[in-house]
């Protein structure tokens, strides 16, 4: 992988990780166009490492939220365990409760990810038939969620039902073409969250999953990738972080006044185009 290719992958990752159009689909297509000479396992490792850049973007953008949640989580549990405020029945604050929701919502993808680790790293997740199909399927489900979702609930109303719904939806992101943000925002809309709330919770919930997969693949990438690849990957990771931060800023503001219709249309267009090329034999599925 050349430096230019790493930068291009970083830009694509940063643009598509948070916008619900599937980063994996675009990275796999880009790797085809650039003729990257990587095995499926090496490509999986490269993508996961570059994703760490967008994880850093989440940390920077939500630094205040993450600090408040972490501080409240520790403070409130210390108060509960020490029995301080006895008689006043100390309870978890909204921030501490949100920390638990992130933990609960992260369990499904952790379990499924570990169970199907080999399949995720193999050729299945690079199959364009799978990618194109999921591009269309999630687009349809997102459209249904937009139509029937009440879109009235904010961050302060989130509960265990939201954590489980969005957490299980995040498992769909393990299937290429689904999109982590697309699947989780879709679930949030189905359970009545506003578009901005669904996106914010989606981004917070991505932190444990992306961190775990990225750090695990980083360790394996050191052994899988050719000598010298880590330097170019580091550049791609930095680029993805910068572009990813801008993407978060854009999407949260966009969803305050717009639907996800433009992303639904884009997914249908790209997914449909890939399927047509596959059926016509102009494009290979693997």
Image: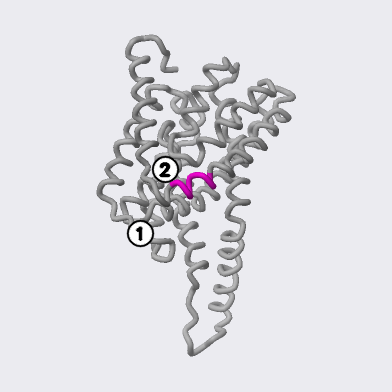
Q: Quadrant of the C terminus?
A: top left
Q: Which residue is at a point 47% across and 53% down the rendered structure image?
A: 200
Q: Would residue 121 be counted in the magenta stretch?
A: no
Q: How is the image coloured?
A: one colour
**The residue stretch that appears in magenta:** 248-254
Where 24 falls versus 114 (above or below)?
above
Work out which residue is located at the far top of the displayed protein and give it. Answer: 281
Label drawn at residue 270:
none
Q: Would residue 253 be counted in the magenta stretch?
A: yes
C-alpha distance separating marks 1 and 2: 16 Å
Which of pointers 1 and 2 lies earlier in the amino acid sequence? Answer: 1
Q: Residues within 10 Å of mark 1 (few under 14, many from 20)?
A: few
Q: Residue 218 appears at what percent x and percent y?
A: 64, 36
Where 20 falls versus 233 (above or below)?
below
Check disc 1 and report the residue beneath it. Answer: 161
Q: Quadrant of residue 245?
A: top right
């Amino acid at each position: 992988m050349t430096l230019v290719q790493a930068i291009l992958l970083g830009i694509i990752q940063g643009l598509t990780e948070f916008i619900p159009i599937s980063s994996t689909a675009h990275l796999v297509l880009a790797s085809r166009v650039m003729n990257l000479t990587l095995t499926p396992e090496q490509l999986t490792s490269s993508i996961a490492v570059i994703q760490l850049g967008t994880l850093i973007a989440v940390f920077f953008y939500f630094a205040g939220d993450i600090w408040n949640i972490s501080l409240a989580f520790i403070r409130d549990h210390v108060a509960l365990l020490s029995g301080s405020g006895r008689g006043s029945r100390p309870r978890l604050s909204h921030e501490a409760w949100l920390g638990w929701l992130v933990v609960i919502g992260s369990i499904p993808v952790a379990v499924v990810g570990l169970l199907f680790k080999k399949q995720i790293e193999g050729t299945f997740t690079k199959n364009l038939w799978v990618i194109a199909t999921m591009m269309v399927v999630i687009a349809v489900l997102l459209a249904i969620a937009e139509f029937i979702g009440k879109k009235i609930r904010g961050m302060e109303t989130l509960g265990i039902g939201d954590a489980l719904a969005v957490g299980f939806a995040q498992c769909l992101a393990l299937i290429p073409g689904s999109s982590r943000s697309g699947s989780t925002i879709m679930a949030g809309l189905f359970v009545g969250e506003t578009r901005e709330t669904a996106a914010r919770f989606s981004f917070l919930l991505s932190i444990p999953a992306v961190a775990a997969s990225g750090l695990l693949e980083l360790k394996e990438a050191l052994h899988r990738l050719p000598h010298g690849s880590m330097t170019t990957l580091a550049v791609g990771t930095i680029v993805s972080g910068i572009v990813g931060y801008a993407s978060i800023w854009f999407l949260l503001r966009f969803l305050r006044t717009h639907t996800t219709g433009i992303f639904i249309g884009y997914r249908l267009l790209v997914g449909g185009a890939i399927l047509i090329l596959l059926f016509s034999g102009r494009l290979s599925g693997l």
